[in-house]
Amino acid sequence: MQNVLILAELGEGKELKNATLSAIEFGYSCLATVGGSLDILVLGSDTKDAVATLKKHGAGKVIVVEDPAFAHYLAEEYAPTVASIASSYGLLVATATTFGKDLLPRVAARLGAAYATDVSGVVTDGGELSFRRPMFAGNAIGYTTLKTAQKVVTVRQSEVQAHEAGGGESSVETAQRVAPSGNARSRIEHVALETVQSERPDLGDAKIVVSGGRALKERFFEVLEPLANTLGAALGASRAAVDAGYCPGDFQVGQTGKIVAPTLYFAIGISGAIQHIAGMKNSKVIVAINKDPDAPIFQVADYGLVADLFTAVPELVTALKNR
Amino acid sequence: MKILVPIKRVSDPDNANKIKVAPGGAAIDAGGLEWKINPFDEYALETALRLTENGAQPKQREGEVVVVSFGPKEVEPILRSALATGASRAIRVEAEDSQLDGGVVAAALKTLVEAEKPDWVILGKQAVDGDSNQVGQMLAELLDAPMATFAATIKEEADGRLLVGREVDGGLHKVRLTGPGVITVDLRVVAPESVYSNKTDPSFKYQEGVRFAPLPAIMQAKKKPLDTKTLAELTDKTAAMNYTKFELPAGRKAGSKVASVAELVAKLTNEAKVL
């Protein structure tokens, strides 16, 4: 059984996340390898808009489970329903966002399936799917098969393009929520999702990313925000800047944070530790600004500027505004 | 409060660029690298210590921290080091790395949790060798327990429940857990005001990062119990992930240096055509 089920991601039970489109694209590339059909599963409290978008992606069907219980995401709430529907599929795919990475291993354990995280591609190995994934902070690529009847994977968004609409309109099927039994769900309570309201694009989807390192100190936002605003860019950071508390944790670009591949990436005051480079080296064009001419970041940058960032960045903002 | 902390030894992540792939791509060769405790597991241990103490009196352990690691005898140094920083007991599960994957480790930990009955299992969110990020989630499901992954903040409430802030895309997801449960930790959990037991004064601030063992504690740790179990005692599951090939990633060539901001803007506009 190789049929593929894609799990869509909705923000707060409603808004379809773009990241889902990478999982769809990856699902189709698995079909191209081993054949079968592809369906999309969506859980949420208000799924109308998401379903309208998802049914334009040529899937066999879009399976919708709409229930007020899905208004706030909790793995303990979602896993029973996802596992129940996924149990008749050979492969379950979601994107490796914090949603996918939280939920899918839990679903995999429920199914008795093996799970590969952050997969960047797929090949066949003796007729079996072999999943390609970066390991050791991106310093090695491994190919693994999953020797269970069912398989579960999350897909690295930056390595797989978004699927474009097309291939005919899918039928829509509704299914019932499977209410969690046992202890797990009753022992966890959603308290709040504290989101940072921002006009800027999501770090994972942004065309331009401006990232800062420890060198920015307490002036992280003061220096970088004008540049990000001028370019319509997302803000990112090195692990060192996050560790030092100069910016929130979800800014971190790197192997253990966000993996990004924008058209243009600015690394400002970032020395270029391996684990940071693993998170941004697939960017189309990399610009580094650093006062240390020997910083390792210059070895991956297309354009390097050796300068004091506290003067160079404001100068850059002015130059961009005057274009 | 009793906490179980599974820890893993990994090849030194700061030198991971020295990793080689054996000819033919059959195996990873990290032979030249030192072994270290996985940094996220080191943070999990620090979290467990903070939850079992009054932060102002860290020598007095208000509860028990048990550490466990899977592997050959060579993993014992990281267990001894955890004992020196404040864990009271250690368990080594004898296994070859080739016998292990996330599913096997989760299944073995389930058996161990059923025997040890900790209030919480606290793990790193991922190990920085395989970057697999799955043991905590799988263990929680196998135990029918609640979980909070990617934890950045943990506050023990008066009734012993834990209010956990999870680092998620775009913000912080706050959840309240009733034990027994599973927590995996992210980077910010070792910040000065991230973790509070209900014995620690809310105005107390920890030092940034993890604590280091003083010399007398290192000596005393040699006398603390370190038990050994075999993998077969804990699970009959076998590894389902099978890495058949490895390769090194394609390198990225360094570009050129520019002399000024004006030249940078000109090149981005006319040469790279990205502005």
Image: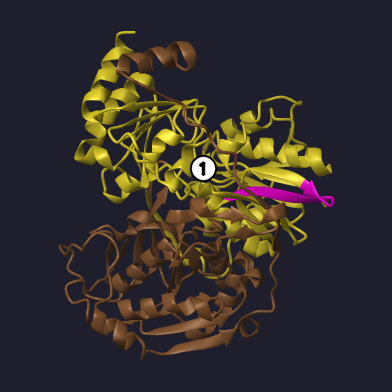
Chain colours: A yellow, B brown
On the image, the x and y values in percent for residue A127 come to: 84, 50
Does the stretch in magenta take in A41?
A: no
On the image, the x and y values in percent for residue A188 come to: 44, 63
User: Residue lying farthest top?
Assistant: A323
On the image, the x and y values in percent for residue A322 come to: 30, 8
On the image, the x and y values in percent for residue A217 come to: 22, 41
Q: In the image, is residue A208 above or below residue A190?
A: above
Does the stretch in magenta take in A128?
A: yes
Q: Residue at x 48, y 36 (%)?
A: A204
Query: As shown in the figure, which amino acid type bears the numbered disc 1?
Result: Gly
Tell me if residue B146 can be seen: no
Judging depth in this view, the residue of A323 and A62 nearest the camera is A323
Query: Magenta region: which residues?
Result: A124-134
Judging depth in this view, the residue of B136 and B25 nearest the camera is B25
Q: Residue at x 61, y 73 (%)?
A: B107
Q: Residue at x 70, y 30 (%)?
A: A57
Q: Which type of secondary structure does the marked residue at label 1 adopt? A: loop
Judging depth in this view, the residue of B25 and A155 nearest the camera is B25
Tell me if residue A94 can be seen: yes
Q: For this view, does B52 lie left or right of residue B2?
A: left
Decide whether the magenta segment is chiefly helix, strand or loop. Answer: strand
- Give the crowd class for mark 1: few <14, some 14-19, many >=20 residues within 10 Å: many
Q: In the image, is residue A62 above or below residue B81?
A: above
Quarter of the image where the C terminus of chain A is located = top left
Indicate the quadrant where residue A169 lies: top right
